[in-house]
Image: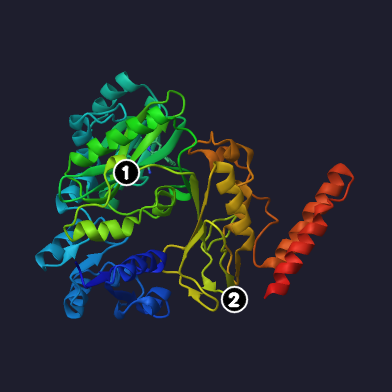
């Protein structure tokens, strides 16, 4: 077993990995940029090394520097977390060449799934359902027209080197075809250095459902059930949950078996996620992409199964068998995760800055993965996600109610956050019914009026007065809840 692991990441996931290592008796090495000198993952680690200036490309993406620190510190393995170098095959290869274990899948698995077109071909051969569309890359309009004869409009043109929503174009009709194909190819070339694009029939009313998979080096591959990730904005997930309110047991098991088939087709080892698009109108589901990393939303799977996915990643990377068989696994209850972003809840603009007051929720079946603290300066150089709040309950409504209670306890002032957005989503009828699609934020959610911006609790008071006044204006009665608003806020203000 490893004695020391370098964590090639920052923020909440670096702390999450540190915790798994420490519980296993493994020492940790943190790497940090100059902007992260006071970040919590640096404080927690057993050793910490500055690897460069704030910009990611000069620090967290600096492969030679990170490998150099691993060698100097005597780390036997590197955990990449998510984002940054976690799906970078050059990094995985550089680790291998340096005799350092990359805690993740093989280079073959990363490169096979990194090229979306080769992944699609591979899935088709493995008998995994793919969205109807082109067999291979398209280069001329004629190629596309031949596909559209099968699929009809609308279609999606996707970049093979894209993924996660990058390099996608929606085409409604033939008149848009020529310009769309040209634009998609040049965009793909500019962004990814690879202009290969392919076509899929557009699924109008989809859910984004993904299956957690796990493989070890003994040939075992299992699925660890689904996560529903449809509540997202511009491909940035906001709320994830497990189980999905849309799946019946039959579909769940079918999706799980298909995901295992997909993972086995590349001899997958470690934690991975097979993303599906679920067609609400037909109940069909199709392979979208496979993410060859641990995901941000892994806590919802951990909460409903009792598995520590990071510890399993480390065990398997050290050549041990995973701790469970498929028949050992079951989902118990319901879990949801809300991502807390340092951003304006209306404009979604990042809101870096110094945190004045910070108190995380606690309590039964309430988990917070966070790296912020009172006085911490949220940097503007990195992803604005500062915390994840996950709650578990026997039923979906228990988990939601617990999340609402926990959000009410959350105190974060000095920066703006999307906490009010979460509060509003968790009371939205469509969300509560569970029959939302990926269009929820744009179509089913009325968002906020422009008056409401969160700076600190004082604004909640003003907003409560505005809401009560509007209530009075429209129904001629004062919202007596205002007094409960005041009482609750008064209590909270006095807490500090
Ligand atoms: C699609 C789709 C509908 N039809 N493909 C691809 C990347 C993944 N993260 C989301 N993707 C989608 N691919 C076909 N053929 C719908 C999505 C999709 C989505 C698309 C645009 C905006 C937000 C979205 C959220 C989830 C899924």
Instruction: Identify which residue is drawn at 28% across, 29% down.
Output: 129
Q: Is residue 470 above or below residue 317?
A: above
Q: Tell which of 457 and 480 is nearer to you.
A: 480
Q: Which residue is label 1 attached to? A: 328
Q: How many numbered marks, from 0 up?
A: 2
Q: Is residue 169 above or below residue 389?
A: above
Q: Helix or strand or loop: what does disc 1 sit on?
A: helix
Q: Quadrant of ligand 1?
A: top left
CA–CA distance in space, label 1 to label 2: 45 Å
Q: Tell which of 448 and 14 is nearer to you.
A: 14
Task: Tell me how the rendering is colored.
Answer: rainbow
Q: Residue furthest top?
A: 149
Q: Quadrant of residue 170?
A: top left
Badge 2: residue crowd in 10 Å (few <14, some 14–19, many ≥20): some
Residue 109 location, x and y as percent?
18, 48
Q: Is residue 221 visible?
A: yes
Instruction: Identify which residue is drawn at 53% across, 44% down.
Output: 394
Residue 328 location, x and y as percent?
32, 43
């Amino acid at each position: 077993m490893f004695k020391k692991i370098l964590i090639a990441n920052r923020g909440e996931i670096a702390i999450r990995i540190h915790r798994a290592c420490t519980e296993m008796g493994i020492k940790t090495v943190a790497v940090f940029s100059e902007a992260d000198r006071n970040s919590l993952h640096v404080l927690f680690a057993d050793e910490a090394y500055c690897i460069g200036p704030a910009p990611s490309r000069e620090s967290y993406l600096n492969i030679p520097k990170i490998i150099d620190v691993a060698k100097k510190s005597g780390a036997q393995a590197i955990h990449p977390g998510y984002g940054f170098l976690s799906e970078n095959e050059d990094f995985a290869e550089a680790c291998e060449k340096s005799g350092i274990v990359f805690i993740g899948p093989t280079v073959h698995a990363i490169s096979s799934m990194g090229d979306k077109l080769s992944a699609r071909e591979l899935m088709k051969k493995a008998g995994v359902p793919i969205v109807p569309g082109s067999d291979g890359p398209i280069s001329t309009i004629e190629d596309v027209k031949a596909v559209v004869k099968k699929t009809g409009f609308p279609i999606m043109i996707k970049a093979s080197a894209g993924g996660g929503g990058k390099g996608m174009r929606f085409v409604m009709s033939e008149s848009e075809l020529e310009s769309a194909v040209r634009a998609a190819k040049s965009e793909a070339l500019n962004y990814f250095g690879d202009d290969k694009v392919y076509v899929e029939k557009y699924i109008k009313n989809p859910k984004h459902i993904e299956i957690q998979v796990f493989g070890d080096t003994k040939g075992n591959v299992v699925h660890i059930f689904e996560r529903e990730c449809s509540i997202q904005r511009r491909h940035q997930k906001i709320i994830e949950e497990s189980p999905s309110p849309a799946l019946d047991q039959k579909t769940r098991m079918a999706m799980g078996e298909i995901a295992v088939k997909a993972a086995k087709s590349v001899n997958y080892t470690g934690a991975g996620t097979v993303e599906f698009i679920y067609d609400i109108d037909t109940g069909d589901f199709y392979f979208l992409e496979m993410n060859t990393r641990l995901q941000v939303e892994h806590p919802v799977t951990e909460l409903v199964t009792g598995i520590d996915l990071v510890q399993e990643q480390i065990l398997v990377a050290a050549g041990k068998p995973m701790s469970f068989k498929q028949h050992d696994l079951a989902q118990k209850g319901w879990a949801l995760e809300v991502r807390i972003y340092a951003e304006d809840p209306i404009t979604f603009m990042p809101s870096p800055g110094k945190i004045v007051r910070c108190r995380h929720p606690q309590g039964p079946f309430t988990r917070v993965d966070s790296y912020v603290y009172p006085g911490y300066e949220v940097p503007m150089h990195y992803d604005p996600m500062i915390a994840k709040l996950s709650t578990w309950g026997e039923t979906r409504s228990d988990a939601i109610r617990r999340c609402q209670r926990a959000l009410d306890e959350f105190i974060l002032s000095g920066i703006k956050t999307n906490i009010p957005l979460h509060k509003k989503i968790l009371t939205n009828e469509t969300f509560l019914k569970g029959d939302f699609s990926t269009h929820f934020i744009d179509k089913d959610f009325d968002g906020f009026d422009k008056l409401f911006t969160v700076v600190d609790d004082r604004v909640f008071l003003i907003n409560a007065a505005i809401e009560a006044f509007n209530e009075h204006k429209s129904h001629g009665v004062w919202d007596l809840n205002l007094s409960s608003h005041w009482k609750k806020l008064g209590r909270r203000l006095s807490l500090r």
